[in-house]
């Protein structure tokens, strides 16, 4: 598959240099300057798994404690620090095949030690949120503070944000993001002709009130939860695509009914019984092993999705690059050690733990197999078990409590990532001291607002979508410097272009063609042979062909196979039911009005005079007027402007 990657990664170094607070000339900070050097050159021998001479360089306490010969660093005095002596003399990194540190890298480490080992995290403590966190605010107030945080960052970095998007671009973007499909031609025309100065805010309110918002939110979370390849059952080998889709629909329905994110999360984690009555049962099978529940699989998923931290390495050993211990992973897993089940049902009172609140590290772990670990909240104390086999309810209460330091910020960061294609903490499930947020005050403000709003997802999205940051254009000046363009995008001074997910693309094609049963299968007959789910499923076939990169929505993963389907599939060349309905309703529309309708129903804008002229020439030169109109529609859905969220 041909992939055209975003240039965002090219700007990571520049963005780090611009991240608040801005360092003075010649200053070194741990996370930005020193840690990358130590990770590359030193932690292979002095990390979590291997600690030669007892030295662990993963954390500041480890550096200050040192190893067998004493402290590695004397804070503020490089010349007295054993670590610096070893580096300066080229004794570290050791080994004939090891490349010695450059003069520049050495200077960064010496400067950092002499300056007292400063960190970005220290500078980000006690940040000003610019908004009191004791009460729920109006969305426009929160949006204004979002822009104030980002504006201060951009100004300090010497970056000028781009202008706001056009009404047409905003309409299309916000409808795709909140409702998962393009607007109808009628919706587009109505909004573009509206002169109300508050039309954007009113549109956001209207979209959030639709069941489509819950549906889109639910299937987005379904994709985040589902592994890249769904597990199969042990008999026919079929995979639970239908059950996974029902799970996403369940999340969407709960949100539409007014449930908070805390309530939805509790109902996922404490579910019991059969999947027929409780679609969220499948969560435990999806994150488990081989389609069945596993305590450690649940722990990793809960940590990533609901806490925003990565514990996958800590399953087998202390994480050498993150400050998570193996006991912390298994302490979390112990809450789920009495749960077992598969795609069909979940039961408690059995499972990996023989005793409630305790779990043994299995033999498949790299270290400490057989040791017993007691249930413990992440970065908290051990949980005292009180006559119950099911520890999931007390865990869920701790997780969704308003004073939990992880829960609100994890959802806020994922919502930001969904809209801006990059988290305030990036990667989105890697919250830790050595991976601080790019905008700490902004993250804290939004998390505080989410808490005081009782975890109201719609309120959060209303706040974000009303911001100027969300409403900026994705366009640059043609002569803009590529590196600065990337820095501006990763600093949230410009909206990135994102690729539609498979769900959104299919629903948008259905709307453009007026066909809710739009069938773009490739002619393969239905089959359930081997590991494959039925290929006769219209949705599944489309997912397989048009699936996108869930971790990077700016990664254009569409290639030859996708292009050939869009260009050659007979259904996309056939009559549009939506166009038929328009022509029956307005038989005297004429060429220009019909072309305008086609543009509005696909690109959410009216055609330019040049586009109208070209379409008229093509249509009037055709022997079959209807086929000519079909050709214009075919051209529009094959444009990058249709495939991208701009």
Image: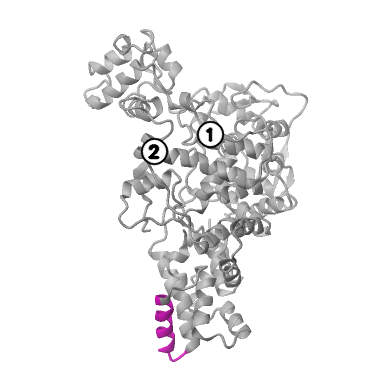
Q: Residues within 10 Å of mark 1 (few under 14, many from 20)?
A: many
Q: Position of residue 547 (x, y in %)?
A: 49, 57
- Which residue sits at x=58%, y=77%? 578
Q: Position of residue 314 (x, y in %)?
A: 51, 29
Query: Is 550 colored magenta in this rendering?
Result: no
- Which label is found at residue 157? 2
Q: Which residue is mark 1?
A: 441
Magenta segment, which residues?
Answer: 610-624
Residue nearest the observer in this picture, 607 or 160: 160
- Which residue sits at x=69%, y=34%? 396
Residue 620: image quadrant is: bottom left
Residue nearest the observer in this picture, 341 or 315: 315
Residue nearest the observer in this picture, 355 or 253: 253
Numbered disc in front, either 1 or 2: 2
Residue 521 shows in this picture: no
Query: Is 612 colored magenta in this rendering?
Result: yes
Q: Are marks 1 and 2 in contact (CB under 8 Å)?
A: no
Q: Outermost residue, right direction?
A: 387
Q: CA distance from mark 1 to mark 2?
A: 16 Å
Residue nearest the observer in this picture, 583 or 494: 494
- Which label is found at residue 603? none
Q: Secondary structure at mark 2?
A: helix
Q: Position of residue 169 (x, y in %)?
A: 50, 61
Q: Outermost residue, bottom direction?
A: 623
- Which residue sits at x=42%, y=76%? 609
Q: Residues within 10 Å of mark 2 (few under 14, many from 20)?
A: some
Looking at the picture, does residue 287 appear above or below residue 169? above
In the image, is 543 to the left or to the right of 346?
left
| Main SS class of the magenta portion in the image | helix
Residue 547 shows in this picture: yes
In the image, is 395 to the left or to the right of 477?
right
């Amino acid at each position: 598959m041909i992939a055209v990657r975003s240039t965002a990664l090219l700007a990571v170094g520049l963005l780090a240099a611009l991240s608040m607070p801005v360092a003075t000339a010649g200053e070194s900070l741990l996370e930005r300057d020193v840690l990358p050097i130590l990770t590359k050159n030193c932690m292979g021998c002095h990390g979590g798994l291997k600690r030669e001479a007892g030295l662990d360089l993963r954390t500041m306490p480890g550096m200050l404690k040192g190893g067998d010969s004493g402290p590695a660093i004397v804070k503020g005095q490089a010349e007295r620090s054993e670590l610096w002596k070893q580096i300066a003399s080229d004794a570290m990194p050791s080994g004939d095949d090891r490349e010695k540190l450059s003069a520049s890298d050495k200077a960064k480490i010496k400067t950092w030690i002499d300056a007292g080992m400063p960190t970005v995290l220290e500078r980000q403590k006690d940040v000003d949120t610019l908004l009191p966190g004791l009460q729920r605010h109006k969305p426009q107030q929160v949006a204004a503070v979002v822009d104030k945080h980002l504006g201060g960052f951009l100004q300090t970095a010497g970056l000028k944000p781009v202008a706001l998007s056009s009404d047409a671009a905003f309409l299309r973007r916000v409808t795709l993001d909140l409702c998962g499909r393009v607007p109808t031609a009628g919706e587009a025309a109505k909004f573009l002709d509206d002169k109300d100065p508050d039309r954007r805010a009113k549109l956001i309110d209207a979209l959030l009130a639709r069941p489509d918002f819950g549906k889109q939110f639910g299937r987005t979370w379904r994709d985040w939860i589902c592994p890249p390849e769904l597990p199969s059952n042990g008999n026919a080998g079929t995979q639970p695509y239908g059950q996974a889709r029902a799970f996403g629909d369940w999340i969407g329905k709960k949100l539409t009914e007014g449930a908070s994110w805390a309530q939805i999360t509790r109902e996922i984690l404490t579910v019991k019984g059969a999947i027929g009555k409780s679609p969220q049962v499948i969560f435990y099978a999806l994150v488990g092993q081989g389609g069945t529940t596993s305590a450690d699989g649940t722990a990793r998923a809960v940590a990533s999705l609901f806490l925003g931290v990565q514990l996958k390495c800590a399953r087998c050993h202390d994480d050498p690059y993150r400050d998570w211990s193996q006991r912390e992973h298994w302490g979390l897993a112990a809450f789920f050690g009495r749960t077992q089940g598969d795609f069909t049902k979940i039961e408690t009172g059995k499972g990996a733990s023989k005793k409630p609140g305790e779990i043994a590290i299995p033999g498949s772990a790299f270290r400490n197999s057989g040791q017993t670990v007691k249930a413990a909240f992440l970065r908290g104390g051990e949980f005292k078990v009180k006559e119950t086999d099911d520890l999931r309810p007390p865990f869920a209460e701790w997780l969704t409590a308003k004073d939990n330091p992880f829960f609100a910020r994890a959802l806020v960061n994922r919502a930001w990532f969904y809209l801006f294609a990059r988290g305030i903490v990036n990667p989105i499930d890697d919250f830790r001291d050595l991976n601080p947020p790019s905008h700490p005050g902004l993250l804290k403000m939004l998390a505080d607002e989410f808490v005081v709003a009782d975890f109201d997802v719609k309120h959060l999205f209303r706040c974000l979508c009303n911001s100027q940051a969300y409403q900026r254009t994705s366009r640059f000046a043609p002569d803009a410097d590529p590196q600065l363009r990337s820095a501006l995008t990763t600093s949230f001074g410009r909206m990135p272009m994102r690729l539609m997910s498979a769900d959104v693309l299919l629903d948008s094609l259905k709307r453009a063609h007026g066909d809710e049963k739009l069938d773009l299968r490739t002619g393969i007959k239905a089959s359930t042979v081997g590991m494959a789910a039925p290929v006769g499923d219209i949705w599944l076939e489309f997912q397989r062909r048009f699936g996108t990169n869930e971790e990077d929505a700016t990664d254009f993963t569409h290639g030859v196979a996708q292009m050939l389907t869009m260009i050659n599939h007979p259904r996309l060349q056939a009559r549009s039911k939506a166009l038929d309905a328009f022509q029956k309703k307005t038989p005297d529309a004429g060429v220009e009005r019909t072309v305008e309708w086609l543009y509005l129903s696909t690109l959410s804008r009216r055609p330019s005079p040049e586009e109208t002229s070209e379409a008229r020439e093509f249509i009037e030169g055709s022997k079959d007027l209807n086929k000519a109109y079909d050709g214009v529609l075919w051209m529009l859905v094959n444009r990058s402007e249709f495939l991208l969220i701009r």
